[in-house]
Amino acid sequence: MAIIETFRRVIDPTDCDMLGHMNISRYFGCVSDAGLGLMTAFGLGHDQLTGGRRQAFAMVHSDATYHREVLAGEWVYMRSGIAEVGRRSATFQHWMYRGTDDELLFDVTAKCVLMDLEARKATVIDEDLKAQMQAFLVEV
């Protein structure tokens, strides 16, 4: 399975700054939504966040590259995969493309820790979750 689509939308004028392109904060809003899409795909969906496991991945470090400007009215989508799964953390990879021509616009590598949502601290990724995440491993 590896890389999957995790996010899709049209950029609104309110997403853009005074320079006329998408504001940096909006890129990371897209990354956040793509991360939720990826988590849902490997078993940490809404039902597990609000009940069930009560665990979620939280970004603690990112490395982003902006390849092209994103403008209001453009349709974008993100594809995501997992570069690495560790004991308490995983590295997610997200790529944003323009929907009309599939041009790479932005990519980010996000180091995330698995949070226990009750204790509000990092916890160990159990073997069941790790096994579900393995299906999304990609070579970066």
Image: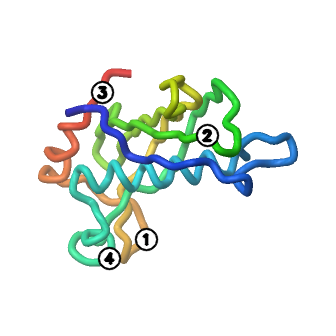
Of the numbered discs 2 and 1, the one sitting upstream in the chain is 2
Amino acid type, mark 2: Glu
| Residue 119 in the image, given as x and y percentages of width and height | 38, 74
Residue in the image at 53% along x and 23% along y: 103
Which numbered tag is attached to residue 138?
3
Task: Give the number of the mark in front: 4 or 2.
Answer: 2
Verify CB contact (< 8 Å) between mark 1 and mark 4: no
CA gap between label 2 and label 3 equals: 27 Å
Residue 13 locus on image (x, y percent): 73, 52
To which residue does mark 1 refer?
120
- The vertical placement of 103 against 22, above or below, is above
Extreme-right residue of the structure: 18
Disc on the earlier residue, 3 or 4 = 4
Does residue 116 appear to the left or right of 67 in the view shown?
left
Instruction: Give me the disc on residue 64.
Output: none
Question: CA separation, marks 3 and 4?
Answer: 28 Å
Q: Secondary structure at mark 4?
A: helix
